[in-house]
Every structure is written in C-alpha cells, then in structure tokens.
Image (tube, helix red, strand yellow):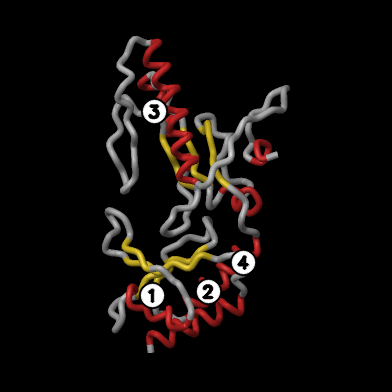
Amino acid sequence: MIARLFNAPLGDTETAMGVGTVGSSEAIMLAGSAFKRNWQNKSKAECEPYDKPNIVTRSNVQVCWENTICVAAILGSTLTGEFEDIKRLNDLLVKKNEDTGWNTPIHVDATSGGFISLFIYPELEWDFRLPLVKSINGYKNVMENCRENMLVLRERIEKTERFNIVSKDVGVPLVAFSLKGQSFHNEFEISEMLRRFGWIVPAYIMPADAQHITVLRVVIREDFSRTLAERLVADILKVLS
C-alpha cells in the first residue's frame, strides 16, 4: 500500500520492500548504509578505491566530490516546514550523472511531509516518480485539518502586524515567524515568557546564510484547534504588551 502511495514502480510482481525503524535518523542511516554498499560494489567492479565515500551534509551546502554515494533531501524542513524542491534536485542530478558517468541516487526524508503531501499536494513530484529517488522514509501522523488550522494561525499572526511569516503554505503544517523591526523583546524572550501561559514555542536561529533571522515555530498537531490558535495569538500579544 505504501509503495503505491509513493508511486513506486512495482512491475508485474506487485511486490515492494521496506523496513520499520524507530525514527527518521535511523532510517536515514540505514539508507546511507545501503547506498554506501551499492557505491562500494560499483567502485570495486570498476577497480576504483572504495574505502572513502563522500557523505554530504547540510548547513546548508557542502562541496560534493566524485565519491558521493547519494544525495539526501528533506520533505518538510525542521525549522520552517517547507518542502525542498526534490524534482529540481533530481533534474540537476540527472544531468550531472550524464556528464560524469556517475550513478548518484536520491534518498528522501519524508518523515514530516510524506503522507501530508500525498493527500494535500498529490500533484507534487517528489517520490518514486522521479527516476533518481531510490528510497524514502516517512509516516502518517497529520491530516488535512492540520493544514487548515495552520492557515488560520498564520492569518491571525499576520493580522497582528508584529511579525513576518517565514514558513510557506506548501510544506509541513507549522508556522514559523519572526519579529518585524525593533521590539522590546526578542524571539527567545517571547518563547520563554509564553511558558507562563502553558505554551512551548521554540525559538531558533536560522542556519548558515540566514543566521540574521530568528524564528518562533508552532507545529500544528491533530489536537491543535482554531480555538487554541486564537488563544495562542492572544497570549503572544499579552507578552508583547
């Protein structure tokens, strides 16, 4: 069922292979191990060194050399919830592989956004429809109602005219926002003071090349209602007053 949802090319056998993990970190490491083994086998067959694969990590871009074994993309970034453009990444990597003779694949971390996109953005191409996507990890934990409540919260925060919205509409149902201009309190102080009202709203400094931006992040769970959205905005305004 999951293979069909992710548009896997099942063929005549209608069979697929997957494995359960305790979380996305383990899933990514298992995928990396599989890609490393494939790269080692390919390098051995070509009589090339196979003891030093290149692992590319984010913060936010790293140099890629000829030993790269795979490219990992995230469908729902941790900080802002936005979906990385996996189709564009696939297209660029197809050309790179053609130019170099490499066979570098893509792993998609879809823990946050995989089952969201299937039902809310079915036209978005990020899964096995793309030829270089060879593995995906993810789970189903949100519904379309989460996105609707996210849009409600986003609208209420925008109406205060005190914040810039950093997150995008297409992505994980969360709202990431930063203060406009000068304020008596910064985002970290707002986060701390909201605890007095029972809210846990983390504040983050964005990664490299965007470190001048600090955001507050609210992740919309299934039990986050529109009433709670109204209450949260009211408490934020109390903190700012």
Residue type pointed to by label 1: Ser
Task: Using the numbered discs, state the Cα–Cα distance from disc 3 to disc 1 in whole angstroms.
Answer: 40 Å
Q: Nearer the viewer, residue 52 or 126?
A: 52
Task: Using the numbered discs, state the Cα–Cα distance from disc 2 to disc 4 in whole angstroms.
Answer: 11 Å
Q: Which residue is mark 3?
A: 69
Picture residue at 62% right of the left edge, 51% below the top = 140
Picture residue at 32% right of the left edge, 14% below the top = 48
Q: Is residue 103 rendered to the left or right of residue 115?
A: left
143 versus 10 height, above or below = below
Residue type pointed to by label 4: Glu
Q: Secondary structure at mark 3?
A: loop
In contact (CB < 8 Å): disc 4 and disc 3: no
Task: Using the numbered discs, state the Cα–Cα distance from disc 4 to disc 3 in whole angstroms.
Answer: 39 Å
Query: Which is in the foreground here, disc 2 or disc 3?
Result: 3
Query: Which is in the foreground here, disc 2 or disc 1?
Result: 1
Q: Is residue 47 rendered to the left or right of residue 85?
A: left
Q: Secondary structure at mark 1?
A: helix
Q: Which residue is mark 1?
A: 191
Q: Residue 148 — which label?
A: 4
Q: Residue 155 — which label?
A: 2
Residue type pointed to by label 3: Ile
User: Quick one: quadrant of the N terminus?
Assistant: top right
